[in-house]
Image (cartoon, rainbow, N blue to C red):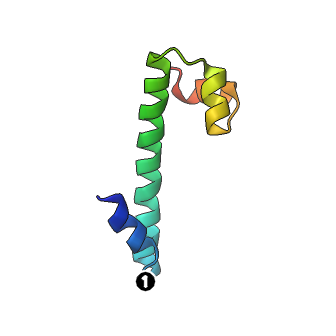
Amino acid sequence: MDPEVLSQRVADADPAVALRAVTALRRLAEQVEAASVARAREQGWTWEQIGDALGMSRQSVHAKYGK
């Protein structure tokens, strides 16, 4: 679903609609993060550089994406 539509639904007066939109946005953010980490690794970034960019430790990033 379109991120713009999701962001509008987050403000919906119906909490069920808003909460489903939050869940969908979370999934989208995870997908974008994973793709960005993969691209950074392909370009030679270290786990430390990626962790710094994400505000995480290199160990956390490696544990999440290092497989």
Residue placed furthest toward the left: 1
Q: Is residue 67 left or right of residue 4?
A: right
Q: Which residue does the numbered mark 1 point to in the structure image?
A: 14
Q: Give the mark count.
A: 1
Q: Residues within 10 Å of mark 1 (few under 14, many from 20)?
A: few
Q: Secondary structure at mark 1?
A: loop
**What residue do we see at 47% from left, 63% from top?**
22
Instruction: Say above or below: 15 vs 62.
Output: below
Query: Compared to 8, does 30 lie above or below?
Result: above
Q: In the picture shown, does residue 41 fall above or below 14?
A: above
Residue at the bottom extreme of this rendering: 13
Q: Residue at x 43, y 25 (%)?
A: 39
Q: Residue at x 60, y 23 (%)?
A: 62
Where does the image place residue 15, in percent across and percent down from the top left?
A: 47, 79
Residue 25: which quarter of the image? bottom left
Q: Residue at x 60, y 28 (%)?
A: 50
The answer to whether 53 is drawn above or below residue 17 in the figure is above
x and y percentages locating residue 47 in the rendered image: 61, 21
Q: Position of residue 63 (x, y in %)?
A: 60, 26
